[in-house]
Every structure is written in C-alpha cells, then in structure tokens.
Amino acid sequence: MEHKLFYKNPYMTRFKSEAVSTGKDESGRSYAVLKETAFYPTGGGQPFDTGTLNGVTVTDVEEVDGEIRHYLTAPMAEREVEGEIDWARRFDHMQQHSGQHILSAAFEDLFDSQTVGFHLGSETVTIDLDREELTEEEAEEAEKLSNRIVAENRPIIAKRVSPEEAAQYPLRKELSVAEDIRLVIIPDFDYGGCGGTHPKSTGETGPIKILGWERQRKKIRLEFVCGQRVLAQLHQKQKIIRDLTGILNAPELQLSDAARKLVLGGKTQEKVLEELRGILLTYEAADLVAENNGHVISRVFQDRTIKELQKLARYVIGEKEEAVVLFVSENGDQLQIVCGKGPKSNGNMKNILMGVLPLIEGKGGGSETFAQGGGRAVMSGQALLGHMHAGVQ
C-alpha cells in the first residue's frame, strides 16, 4: 500500500514520482504505471480520479493485476513524473462517499435496513436498501439523523487493521477481504471496511439530501446528493421554480395548486375539443353522403390521421348503410388508407386494402367490413384511390 498516496493523504493534489512502465492496452489506450501515485483507481463504488501527468491528461485510472494504470490522451516518454489531481472531482467523491456511509448507517440504526448496493454517479448517488417499502416519514427520519451526524462534525478515521483487530469492532457488514483490511470509522456511529477516500470529519461531507426512491427487484433504490451537489440541485430547482412562477403567474408556495388547475383545465378543454371534433365529423360525413349519389363514397384528404379517417368513415356508414367508403390521406411522404362498408353493401374491404398495399410498399390489416393501412407516397393519393375503386364490386 506504500505506493498509494491517496491513502496516506487524500488531500494531496500534487506529487512527484517515477514511471516504472508504459504501454498500451488491448484497445490501444496509452497508459503509465508509477512508482507511487495519488490518483485513485476505480473501485468500491467510487470512480477514478482525473488530472494530468507531466501536463498530459489522465482520462481513466484502473488497478490491473496489482498495478495502477493511468490512461493518457498521449504516450508519455519521461521517467520523472509530476502529477496533479483534479481536486474538485476528488473532493466531490470524498463528500459523496462519506455521505453514503452516514446515510447507510442511519437506515441501519433506525430501521435495521442494510445497504446492499452503492453507485456514485456523476450527478447523484444511489444506495440499494434491503427492504421492499419506504415511507416519506422513514426517509425524513434517516435524513435528519444523517445531517445531525454531519453537524456534530465527528472525526472520520481510516486505519489498517489485522483480522483479529477488525473482529473487535461492531462492523456494519461482513468484510470482503481477509487481509489488507482498511476500516473507515465514525466513532459511536459507523464502522465498516472501505477502500475509498474520505474527508477527515463528517462536517466536510456537507448537507445530505434524499431526492427520491423507487422499488427495484424487491429492494429500494434511494437517490441522494451531498455537499456541493446539494447546492447544485438547489440552484437548478430554484431556477425552474422562478420560471414556473412567471409562467403560472403564482407565488412559489401556490405553484402546485396552479399547475393542478392548469392540467385539469387542459383535460377538460381537450375533452370538449374532442366532442366538437366529433360533431364536425358528423357534419362532414353528411356532406360527403350528399355529394355522392352512388354507393361508393371516396375522397383524398391532406394530413388526416388514421384515427380521424376511421371515425369519419364510420359516420358515413351510419348515414348510408349501403355505402362503400374509400379514404386516402396524403401525409408528407406517407399515404394513409381507410376503407369500410355498411351492412347493406357488398365487397371485402380487407381484400381491397391488400390489393393496393404492395403498390405503396405498405402494411395494414382489418376485416371484411373495415380495414386500414399505410405506406410510402410513391404515387398520388388520387392514383391510389383509382386502384382501390377497381377492387369494388
């Protein structure tokens, strides 16, 4: 562990070292292995550090076969190396990881709910709790306890111990290793094995805020943020609230009511509009029947949906039971088709449709009395209608 400077001092941002090997992996990425490094490699749910080695950008850090590989944007030839860590990223990870320890311990202390999964994402953090349900009251209680531990600014202690020494602590879960055991301890609150980087006290974690949760495979996946991410979330949400207060013309505390009224009003208006569309279609159907003396009623429309053509066709059949209805709509580079017949007419609508679909590379289906489909506009709607007429008995 002597070569892992991030364990000796997680606050180290600059260091000097030597390159012991360089190369490329199987995918062609250049990497360097150093005698010692402050770059944390991906592991234990915590992402890797980024930064530079001799000014060359480090894009990834992985531990492979016991060596820490620093993947670079360009090969590095120098033996002497000066490294610099992206401190903002490192400290963010330290805050989120310590916050996870605190929140997980809170759920275990309060509700005996163990954490069985952990993911530190670029914007939020998640833990999987070994339980199937979680109430608002329980989440709030765990959040309050977590922030009390933060406010008490308790020390966060990382130490190497032997298996015998580890057995003396009330560990939150069973250790995953039998040697090189590293414990992270918040006295009188949390004791666990961990290989991540952490601040020296809970106060540096900053506030902990639960964002939400959902049930996944009989577990609760809980999403939260800590420290600077809480401020980022607050800034983002406050901007949205300011925008909504202007759009809805309501103060912040009344936004929910204003939005609810708007949605309900919109649904009511949509229902009224749908009823009015239906009335208009009945008038349009009556006009089509009046304009056509024969039993075949056909028309080419522009930009009408299948649903609208179906309704119109059924209204026409309702007006004239001996009618055969053939409708085509030209919708950009697509043609839509609806054909139907009344109870007092002859013919097979599915056969008419299937007879013309190959002409437009189309698809569709239906029954003897009603069918619909569509395809590419490789011909005009009027030309397609002519082919459909040929199939009417």
Image (tube, helix red, strand yellow):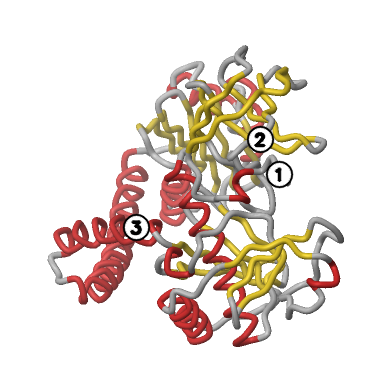
Which residue type carries mark 1?
Glu
Q: Is residue 123 left or right of residue 71?
A: left
Which residue type carries mark 3?
Gly
Question: Which quarter of the figure is the C terminus placed in?
Answer: top right
Residue 153 shows in the view = yes
x 53%, y 34%: residue: 15
Foreground of the two, 285 or 190: 190
Label at residue 36: 2
Residue 110 in the image: state x and y as whole percent.
60, 87
Label at residue 2: 1
Residue 326 in the image: state x and y as whole percent.
49, 36
Q: Is there CB contact under 8 Å for labels 2 and 1?
A: yes
Q: In this view, does 274 lie to the left or right of 110?
A: left
Foreground of the two, 207 or 286: 207
Instruction: For mark 2, give the secondary structure.
Output: loop
The crowd level at tag 3 (other Cα within 10 Å; few <14, some 14-19, many 20+) is some
Of pointers 2 and 1, the one earlier in the residue sequence: 1
The crowd level at tag 2 (other Cα within 10 Å; few <14, some 14-19, many 20+) is some
- Residue 264: quadrant of the picture: bottom left
Of pointers 2 and 3, the one earlier in the residue sequence: 2
x 82%, y 36%: residue: 65
Which residue type carries mark 2?
Glu
Instruction: For mark 1, give the secondary structure.
Output: loop
Foreground of the two, 348 or 61: 61
Q: Is there CB contact under 8 Å for labels 3 and 1?
A: no
- Residue 192: quadrant of the picture: bottom right
Of pointers 3 and 1, the one earlier in the residue sequence: 1
Distance of label 2 from label 1 (alpha carbons)? 7 Å
The residue wearing badge 3 is 278
Instruction: For mark 3, give the secondary structure.
Output: helix
